[in-house]
Image (cartoon, rainbow, N blue to C red):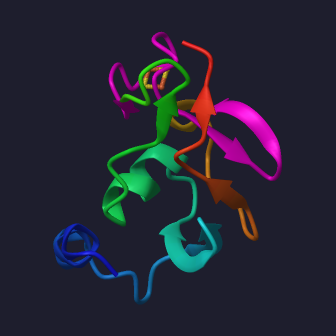
Amino acid sequence: MSMTAIKAERRRPPLEGRNTVTIEVDGRSMQAFAGESVAAALLASGHQVFRRTEKGNAARSLFCGMGVCFECLVRIDGEPNVRACMTSVREGMVIETGAASDD
Ligand code: FES
């Protein structure tokens, strides 16, 4: 686990006693609040890079947070280019970050 991820987990409110779901992010199982966005879950777990651009391999992450900019694209359950800010986590969801996408 990276130092960024460790610091992010320390900032996250305790999950005990809350309604949570288990998701998988880049092959790692983690808990998220039921109903929160994929973007919120990713940031809370220390994932700051959601994807990379095809040209230049530039890092992209959450920008508008409301479905307009398409900077937050991730792969969810095998479906590419899903907006993390507009998608709620659900039990068993598999999320992949860091993939190159057209830009
Ligand atoms: S952050 Fe802009 S569409 Fe998701």
Q: Position of residue 36 (x, y in %)?
A: 50, 52
Which image quarter is the C terminus in? Answer: top right
Range of magenta residues:
59-82
Q: Nearer the viewer, residue 26 or 23?
A: 26
* Residue in the picture at 63% in, 54% down: 96
Which corner quadrant of the image does residue 91 belong to? bottom right
Which corner quadrant of the image does residue 66 belong to? top left
Q: Position of residue 39 (x, y in %)?
A: 45, 44
Number of numbered discs visible in the structure rendering: 0
Q: Is residue 61 magenta?
A: yes
Which image quarter is the N terminus in? Answer: bottom left
Does residue 98 appear in this view?
A: yes
Q: Is residue 19 magenta?
A: no
Q: Position of residue 61 (x, y in %)?
A: 37, 34
Q: Nearer the viewer, residue 46 or 2?
A: 2
Q: Position of residue 95 (x, y in %)?
A: 65, 56
